[in-house]
Image: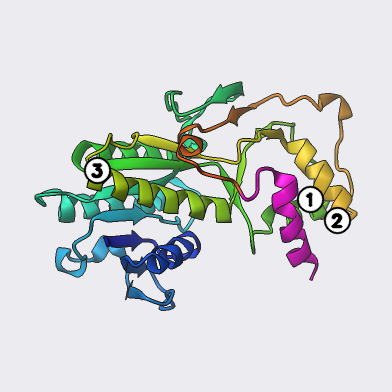
Amino acid sequence: MAKILIAGCGDLGSGLATNLVAQGHTITGIRRTKHDFPGGVKGITGDLVTMSDEALPDADLIFLIMTPKGRHEAAYRAAYFDTAQVLIRRYKDMPKPPKVFFVSSTSVYGQSQGEWIDETTPAQPESATANILLETEQALAAVLPSVAVRCSGIYGAGRFRLLEKVLSGENWQANSWTNRVHRDDVVSALVLLANVALANAALMDKPLPQQVIVTDQTPVSMWEVKLWLATCLGAKIAVSDSGQFTPTSGKRIQGQYLLSQGWTLRYPSYVVGYQALLAEFKS
């Protein structure tokens, strides 16, 4: 059984930890402020950036799953790049450095003319925050064996932002392609990656790719999603120019690696995924 560190044991990290504990692994979880951890997890509460090397355990695998305190450059640098530097400092000189899975974002693909994106597509970040994510990926890869786990827009239980926006009645912006993945499917993807990494290490098999995309494989126009949600919620269709139904921007994302490893989506489209969320929202 492996020693696994989950740096960022919040919603995604806790789901991952619960699954890995059930498999018999030794799990250490770090949270910035809260003290509640899944059963069987050794919990550490504190800011990873200020932690000493001695506070961080030896590990075979590390999952870096951070959430920035804001959607601006400084918050992203503190949450991602600075925490990665702590892991690099702590683990780079180990005889056998741990494999690091950094939960990143498909925002590193700045393409926005309806292009199809997969793991072979070069990252071309267009925003300051996306640049920081790519910098973090590259910093880790330069020193430690690492995989950038690039997730599209994550939704799921308790994540009501889009529903509230549809209900607000504010005018819909120009239509664009959108890509989503349910929180539970992200957790199952991370569990699969852990299992593949451990199996490969035991069998001396081929290494994992440097980047993996996690998405529901069903790119869709934002207006289609909003129209469906508005119908379900009885909300206003806030479209000022219905002639612009064809998306004018965005990208269409599909990932192949996870599927090749047997990953099965529980929520293969937004319709399936949002049904449970709508029931929770209305209750």
Comparing labels 3 and 1, the label whose residue is closer to the camera: 3
* Amino acid type shown at disc 3: Leu
| CA–CA distance in space, label 2 to label 3 | 51 Å
Crowd around label 2: few <14 · some 14–19 · many ≥20 (10 Å): some
Residue at the image point whose x is 29% and y is 36% from the top: 138
On residue 166, which mark appears? 1
- In this rendering, the answer to whether 130 lies above or below 165 is above
Q: Residue 148: within the magenta?
A: no
| CA–CA distance in space, label 1 to label 2 | 9 Å
Magenta span covers which residues? Answer: 266-283
Q: Position of residue 211 (x, y in %)?
A: 39, 35
Q: Secondary structure at mark 1?
A: helix
Along the line of sight, the residue nearer the viewer: 199 or 142: 199
Circles 2 and 3 in contact, beta carbons < 8 Å = no
Circles 1 and 2 in contact, beta carbons < 8 Å = yes
Q: Residue 272: within the magenta?
A: yes
Q: Position of residue 100 (x, y in %)?
A: 29, 48
Residue beneath disc 2 = 233
Residue 66 in view in this figure: yes
Residue beneath disc 3 = 203
Q: Secondary structure at mark 3?
A: helix
> Which of the two discs, 3 and 1, labels the residue nearer the N terminus?
1
- Which residue reaches farthest front? 203
* Amino acid type shown at disc 1: Val
* Amino acid type shown at disc 2: Leu
Residue at the image point whose x is 59% and y is 46% from the top: 265
Indicate the quadrant where residue 32 lies. Answer: bottom left
- In this rendering, the answer to whether 6 lies above or below 214 is below
Q: Is the magenta region chiefly helix, strand or loop?
A: helix
| CA–CA distance in space, label 3 to label 1 | 50 Å
Residue at the image point whose x is 17% and y is 49% from the top: 97
